[in-house]
């Protein structure tokens, strides 16, 4: 390959990423309105599916996971044809949501998926995208092969949920996704990469707000509008460089102008780079509808195909059914009225019958031809996508992994984002510090000059400090659960592994806990009149309690579905750790069969260690604290013995167990359910 000069590389790169408003306006849905780039229209995906269907038990809600047959990966006997019966109950008593549908789509096609509510549009899209968590039926092949672990490397899914972090800018959200899906050639400079990001934002009308925060109205954080969030969700999928895209209602909430702008760009992307795009959309305008190449039209009760073919042939097809479209009517609006059950003059069954007789045999013949036609594996697709990029410099070795970048790159990207989120979320940070200051002042005033008072009261002070540390981190569970939901969405797209999220988040949480806890003890200490030498003992052991309880709350935030459930689940743990604390319940008063609770309680070990340290510093190693010398008697009363090494081991074991359970829960629980 001839080595390009820097100027030639820059010019070639500019030609790839720039799309002027005039170019976009010229896209009108006519043949040849977009010229394919033969050099970069590589790694093509042919999607073929046969007899895809979905049903649930009659008493089950559509959105609830359920048990049914698994996805077929080979040819299995077909079920009976529903024809025009409209019967939503199958022979085995299950409720049909989506009846059998087959199809074959080529690279470079922009496919519209339309139908009334309840027709199964999202269900079909989720199944084809490999996102349907509930079992379903049907065969889905990519280039004549079943999907493998590399599927997420060559595909992108744009859901209806616009879950994003409130304290990131529009550009940062886009860059995060783009950089984790694809690796940059060696000669692509930062300036060129910036040009690429800005080109994406410009195409979707987001360039002027690229430095605006996403925001979250629920948290009182101002940010971009709902329509802008929708467009950002769409451009995230586009920037990943996928060869096949699935978009669930990407134009919902957009103005008519913005919706047309987005669909024009999607047509340009599909035709210029041979990307297959399947998009569910709700009754587009005439100008938008004609931008699509193909149409899948479904009716409901249950979801059945009434038309499947070129968008331009819809009017002729409707006329053959006996429903000619009036000249001035929007074809998609007119057809939607005819195929929506319950609408006045609806004729959905006639459309279903005509499709079964005229179109389905043709589609089944095409599916049979392409279903097992081997056109290359996902790895070969990725390899083909790399070839034209070599002109921009050497590429890192191709990874046979579901993740686009190495683990260290994942950790670096997630860690940098976490740092920015924590730095920018000043409300959370300031509230954390304010809580530490408030606790210090309240406890300091309540136990003012406690170091010079009776030592039995001093032990009570140690107990209240540890109680405050035990419940301190419970306030973080709602935020952790909200963050977990975003993480689940991103890991389902294989942006990064759960470990790449856990490691930096755990480290930063621990660092923040150490700092805020130090502020708490440091501000509290001047109120107390204790010797300075006792400070380290109180700080260390109360910090250990804080870390154990923080790990507990982190674990519960990984298990529970929402913050309310997490708080309810925390009660038994709090009762055990805070009741069996070595002060209100201790070894001589605890039933023998409940001693295990004391042996695992971080509060009990901390109470013991701090009291022994206070006895040594205040009685044995120097002048007595307070007006008496009760510590020897207190140690005997509570059966306190020196066992700091064991205490550290037990507390570390508590932390490791809670963190390990949290990691397992992040991997297997509360996954995105579709």
Image: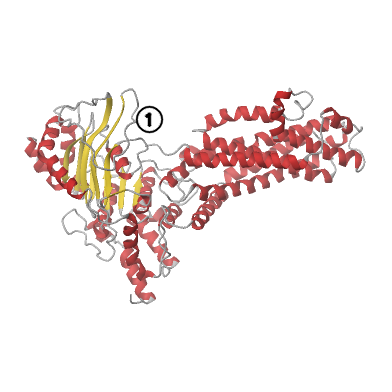
Quadrant position of the C terminus in the picture: top left
**Considering depth in this image, is 354 or 316 the residue closer to the camera?**
354
Is 403 on the left-hand or right-hand side of 612? left
**Considering depth in this image, is 646 or 548 the residue closer to the camera?**
646
Percent x, y of residue 458: 82, 33
Q: Quadrant of residue 200?
A: bottom left
Quadrant position of the N terminus in the picture: bottom left
Please say if 392 is above or below 520.
below
Seen at 52% across and 54% down, the residue is: 411
Percent x, y of residue 622: 92, 43
**Considering depth in this image, is 529 or 613 the residue closer to the camera?**
613
Q: Quadrant of residue 274?
A: bottom left
Is 613 on the left-hand or right-hand side of 343? right
Is 269 on the left-hand or right-hand side of 215? left
Percent x, y of residue 334: 15, 37
Is 573 on the left-hand or right-hand side of 270? right
The 10 Å Cα crowd at callout 1, few under 14, some 14 to 19, many 20 or more, is: few
**Considering depth in this image, is 106 or 73 the residue closer to the camera?**
73
Q: How many marks can you see?
A: 1
For residue 226, say whether it is visible: yes
Q: Quadrant of residue 620?
A: top right
Q: Secondary structure at mark 1?
A: loop
Seen at 37% across and 30% down, the residue is: 64
For residue 220, say whether it is visible: no
Color encoding of the figure: secondary structure
Percent x, y of residue 658: 60, 39
Report which residue position mark 1 lands on. 64
């Amino acid at each position: 390959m001839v080595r390009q000069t820097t100027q030639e590389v820059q010019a070639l790169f500019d030609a790839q990423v720039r799309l002027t408003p005039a170019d976009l306006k010229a896209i009108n849905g006519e043949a040849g309105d977009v010229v394919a780039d033969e050099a970069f229209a590589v790694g093509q995906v042919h999607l073929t599916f046969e007899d895809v269907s979905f049903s649930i038990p009659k008493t089950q809600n559509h959105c609830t996971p359920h048990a049914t047959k698994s996805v077929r990966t080979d040819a299995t006997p077909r079920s009976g044809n529903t024809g025009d019966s409209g019967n939503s109950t199958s022979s085995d008593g299950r409720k049909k949501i989506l009846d059998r549908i087959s199809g074959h789509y080529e690279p470079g096609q922009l496919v519209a998926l339309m139908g009334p509510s309840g027709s199964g549009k999202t269900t079909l899209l989720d199944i084809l995208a490999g996102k349907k968590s509930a079992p379903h039926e049907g065969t889905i092949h990519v280039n004549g092969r079943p999907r493998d672990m590399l599927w997420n490397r060559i595909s992108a899914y744009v859901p209806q949920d616009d879950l994003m972090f409130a304290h990131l800018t529009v550009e940062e959200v886009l860059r995060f996704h783009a950089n984790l899906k694809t690796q940059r050639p060696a000669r692509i400079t930062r300036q060129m990469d910036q040009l690429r990001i800005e080109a994406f934002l410009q195409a979707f009308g987001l360039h002027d707000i690229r430095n605006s925060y996403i925001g979250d109205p629920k948290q009182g954080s101002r940010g971009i509008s709902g329509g802008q969030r929708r467009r950002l969700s769409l451009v995230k999928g586009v920037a990943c460089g996928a060869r096949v895209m699935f978009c669930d209602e990407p134009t919902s909430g957009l103005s008519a102008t913005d919706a047309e702008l987005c669909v024009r760009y999607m047509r340009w992307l599909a035709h210029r780079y041979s990307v297959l795009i399947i998009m569910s959309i709700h009754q587009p305008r005439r100008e938008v509808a004609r931008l699509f190449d193909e149409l899948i039209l479904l009716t409901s009760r249950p979801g059945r195909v009434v038309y499947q073919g070129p968008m331009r042939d819809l009017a002729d097809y409707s006329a053959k059914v006996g429903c000619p479209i009036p000249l001035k009517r929007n074809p998609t609006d007119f057809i939607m009225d005819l195929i929506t059950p319950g609408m006045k003059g609806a004729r959905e069954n006639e459309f279903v019958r005509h499709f079964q007789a005229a179109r389905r045999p043709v589609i089944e013949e095409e599916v049979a031809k392409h279903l097992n036609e081997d056109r290359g594996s996902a790895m070969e697709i990725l390899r083909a996508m790399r070839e034209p990029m070599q002109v921009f410099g050497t590429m890192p070795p191709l990874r046979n992994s579901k993740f686009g970048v190495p683990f260290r790159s994942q950790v670096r990207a997630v860690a940098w984002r976490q740092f920015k989120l924590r730095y920018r979320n000043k409300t959370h940070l300031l509230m954390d510090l304010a809580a530490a200051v408030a606790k210090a002042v309240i406890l300091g005033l309540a136990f003012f000059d406690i170091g010079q008072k009776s030592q039995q009261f001093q032990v009570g002070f140690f107990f209240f400090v540890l109680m405050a540390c035990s419940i301190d981190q419970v306030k973080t569970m709602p935020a952790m659960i909200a963050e977990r939901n975003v993480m689940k969405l991103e890991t389902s797209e294989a942006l990064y592994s759960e470990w790449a999220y856990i490691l930096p988040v755990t480290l930063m949480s621990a660092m923040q806990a150490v700092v805020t806890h130090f502020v708490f003890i440091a501000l509290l200490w001047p109120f107390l009149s204790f010797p300075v030498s006792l400070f380290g003992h109180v700080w260390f052991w109360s910090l250990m309690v804080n870390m154990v309880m923080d790990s507990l709350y982190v674990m519960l935030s990984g298990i529970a579905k929402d913050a309310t459930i997490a708080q309810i689940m925390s009660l038994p743990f709090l009762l055990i750790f805070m009741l069996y604390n070595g002060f209100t319940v201790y070894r001589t008063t605890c039933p023998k069969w409940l001693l295990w609770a004391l042996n695992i309680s971080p509060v009990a070990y901390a109470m013991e260690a701090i009291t022994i340290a206070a006895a040594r510093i205040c009685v044995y190693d120097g002048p007595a604290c307070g007006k008496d010398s009760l510590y020897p008697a207190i140690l005997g009363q509570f059966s306190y013995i020196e066992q700091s090494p064991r205490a550290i081991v037990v507390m570390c074991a508590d932390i490791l167990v809670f963190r390990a359970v949290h990691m397992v829960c992040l991997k297997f629980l509360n996954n995105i359910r579709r």
